[in-house]
Image: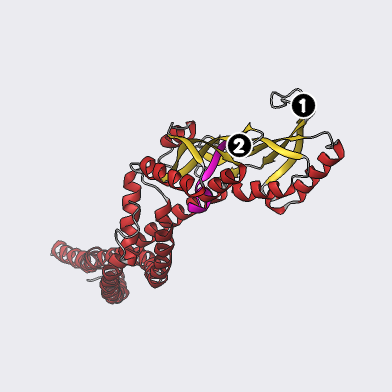
Amino acid sequence: MKNTVDKTCKRKIFASVIVPVSLLAILVNACLLPLKRVHDRNVLELKELNEKISPAKEVAGRAPLLLQQELDLSRKLNAVFPFILSPDTAYTDLNLKTYDFARKIGLDLRSVNHHPSPAESWMNSARACYFCRPFSLNMTAQGRLEQIYQFVGLIEKDNPFAAVSEMALRLRDPSMAVFYMELVVDWPVFSERSIHESLQKMYDKKTGSAGQNSHK
Amino acid sequence: MFPRWARVVSCILYCLMVPVVIAIIYWGNLHRWTRDQLAEQQSVWESLKPVQEAVQIQQSRLNLGKQFLQELDGWNRNRIICYPVMTSLDELIPNGVHLAALQIFGSLECFSAPQADKKHPAPQVGREYQFRFCFKGDQTVGSGKILNFLQSMRQSHEISKYFSSITIGGIDKDSPMNIEDTVQIFCVDAVAEKRYVIKP
């Protein structure tokens, strides 16, 4: 009899401890901890999103300013595009131009040749670094000093990027003050046709002047 | 008999459940709030993302254009405009002195190879102009006249703005240009500083 009472009592004690412990364990493990985990994950995602959103808002806020800047830039670029020659047509264009200049001032232009200069060769290998590379034209001419000066002046005035690379003037006929000139001039040409095309396309769109400014 | 200590323990355990339930309600609400916030922020991000991408493309396009203009500016700056130099020189040449020869060296040079660091990824390209003017003068031209001429070249704005050094390169009576023995041949060397396409 006493044994049965003890057994019942032990069961009751066991139940009175185990039931709340299990309930607590269930509440903590099945509800509280998952909720906290989800909450923590959400907080982390929120933080990450906020980190992305605030710079994105800042970037988006710059859009009107950038648009204005781009319009200004496209105007500037369209103004300089005609001076940068296409590597494909540079020789023909410059030949025509130099003969035209010489004729204008009555200079006896003896020859116009293109021998790739060392700079052209190594600038070719530096294509990735520069948009342009030089295109050198070797010229020989003879005439009076004023004519030679004018010829050089016309070349320099015609293209703000053309540079006298080498020049040798020698007095040929002292009595007539005629000089013989050897001249090497560098014009910038696009390193690659694709650069020219992509820049032109990019900025023609902005001003709506596609093709107008492309150089021949 | 149900012992007293068991009742106390049971009571404590049930009491412990109260804060746990409160915590569950609290975390539940918090979770709902963060979930709503997350959804809201996600919709904001969805709307901002294409704008940000478009602006970034616009920015890179702008940078490309700026770089191109900067390089072109370098192409413009690295040259010496010879016409004003030559015409100014023409005005400065004293009586009895005539230009006999002129040599210009100003080819594009690679001053330094590209470096591995991010600061100098491109080779440093530029020109280092050297002008050599050779003059012939008659017997009236003495060294004083030559020095005065040199001084006036140094003072001329069109010439001095380009050249950091203007010196007499030599006086040579035996020059091959000297056909008549009576004339005096002297040269003036003008050297400009390095002019880079892209400033280092």
Disc 1 chain ID: B
| Front residue of this view, candidates B97 and B18 | B97
What secondary structure is marked by label 2? strand
What residue appears at the point 29 percent right and 58 percent down from the top-left corner?
A211
Q: Quadrant of the N terminus of chain A?
A: bottom left
Q: What residue is shown with label 2?
A: A178
Closer to the observer: label 1 or label 2?
Answer: 2
Disc 2 chain ID: A
| Front residue of this view, candidates A117 and A41 | A117
User: Amino acid type of disc 1?
Assistant: Asp
Q: Position of residue B106 (x, y in %)?
A: 58, 38
- Relative to B90, is B133 above or below? above
Q: What residue is shown with label 1?
A: B172
Q: Given the current orientation, which residue lies at the most extreme front position?
A: A175
Q: Position of residue B173 (x, y in %)?
A: 78, 25
Instruction: Say whether mark 2 and mark 1 are on the same chain.
Output: no
Disc number at residue B2? Answer: none
Q: Is residue A161 magenta?
A: yes
Q: Is residue B169 magenta?
A: no
Image side of residue A12 versus residue A74, left or right: left
What residue appears at the point 43 percent right and 32 percent down from the top-left corner?
A116
User: Amino acid type of disc 2?
Assistant: Val
What residue range appears in magenta?
A: A155-168
| Front residue of this view, candidates B89 and B21 | B89
